[in-house]
Image (tube, rainbow, N blue to C red):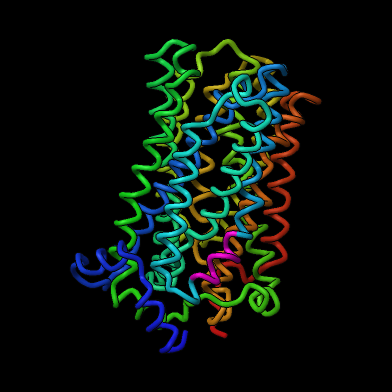
Amino acid sequence: MTQSTQSYATSTSSGLERDARQHSAGTINDPGQIALGVIIGRSSEFFDFFVYCIASVLVFPQLLFPGDSAIVGTIHSFAIFSLAFIARPIGSLVFMTVDRRYGRGTKLTLAMFLLGGSTAAMAFLPSFDTAGMFAIYLLCSLRFAQGLALGGAWDGLASLLALNAPDNRKGWYAMMPQLGAPLGFILASSLFAYLILTLSAEDFLAFGWRYAFFVAFAINVVALFARLRLVATSEFGSLLEQNELQAARIRDTIKHNGRTVLLGALVPMVSYALFHLVTVFALSWVVLYTPANPGQFLLTQAVGAVLCGLGIIASGFIADQIGRRKLLGYSAGIIAAGALLTPLLYTYNIINEGMIVLGGFAVLGLCFGQAAGTLASNFKREYRYTGSALTSDLAWLLGAGFAPLIALLLCVAYGLPGVGAYLLSGAAVTLLVLHFNKQFGKKNTD
């Protein structure tokens, strides 16, 4: 970024960014401070994410598709769910332009308000009985806006953390951003469980679920200010410049680092597929195929998220001992074995849905904890920032965006063995990429 561009970006900074800069205290002199900013930001984003996930199972099928069967309504709801992942790369393209012209603080402020605003607007979503097809189109638009915002919410903190971590603790610091996922899920699932268990089914569907979307907006505002306190400091800008973490054009990034982007997007395939199978798909399975209470199952999933968090922490220690590549390979192998055995064990009542979810969350922590930790070091310096953002967008699109929809369609057609086959395919992709990409996780000094 040129000096004139930097000056213009500073002069056009948002009021929130200037306020955050005035109240920022201390300096950014160790990875721990960066890690805190990453965890806060990721937790707020994942809370928004999981609030929508849970509603896509418990609310939207009944609210927007009352004339369809429960299964068909959920399939339609999962199709809308995927729109955010399609929009994420577009959001990165749009907000990278904002970043280059007006600065990272302005970009982050706009993205977070778009994310919080579109999420809060869902709280006012009318039913199909009230507004007809307009209600469906409105949800599609708001979901797409969420995806645009998530693409713009990339602030470079995760890449900066990976690049500034001590050489012997790369795995430990790589897992820290991933803690936002279980933290966000614990908050979202616990909130929905409380609403379901304390309200009647009629009251929950009429107004109870809307409260969670208001909470999501409030959390976004708090998280935005916390992140801006870090992003707006001069020390943060200096660290970005030292590591050349500046927004580059996506076209140039793909031209010079297209292979790295593709491989980086495929490595976490099994992690992101399992991510949605144990969260949103598992909830849909319980609602559609079992008599279990959704509120009680959400609490079980919250316990699973605790196990996931512990697994993520353990992954940091293990990766520093044996290497990230080996850990991801072993984890993919365990998931592949589980994909083959779980349908059989469930059919013979050896395990139940609660045990499947708890075990899935635990394994998820090990692989998810290292799924996207040090990608920035594999990019040429001038493309690190944009390359890491684009890789993350594509990884979520390919590995997670359509996972609930595909899993449910396979489940309807072939039962749980079909879901197991889908997860097995994800494990195969991860293992193949790790096998042919010997340099994964090694630093590129170009």
- Quarter of the view holding residue 207: top left
In the image, residue 396 above or below residue 407: below
In the image, residue 58 above or below residue 176: above
At x 68%, y 75%, the residue is 251
Place of residue 365 in the rendered image (x, y in percent of width and height, measured from the top left):
49, 44
Place of residue 29 in the rendered image (x, y in percent of width and height, measured from the top left):
26, 73
- Number of labels in the image equals 0
Q: Residue 60 lies in magenta, yes or no?
A: no
At x 49%, y 61%, the residue is 373
Label the magenta part by its dominant secondary structure: helix
At x 39%, y 35%, the residue is 214
Q: Is residue 233 left or right of residue 372?
A: left
Q: Quadrant of the C terminus?
A: bottom right
- Quarter of the view holding residue 289: top right
The magenta segment is 91-98
Determine if residue 322 is in view. Answer: no
Place of residue 148 in the rendered image (x, y in percent of width and height, measured from the top left):
57, 54
Please state which of residues 371 and 54 is positioned toward the viewer in this rendering. Answer: 54
In the image, residue 208 above or below residue 56: above
Determine if residue 305 is in view. Answer: yes
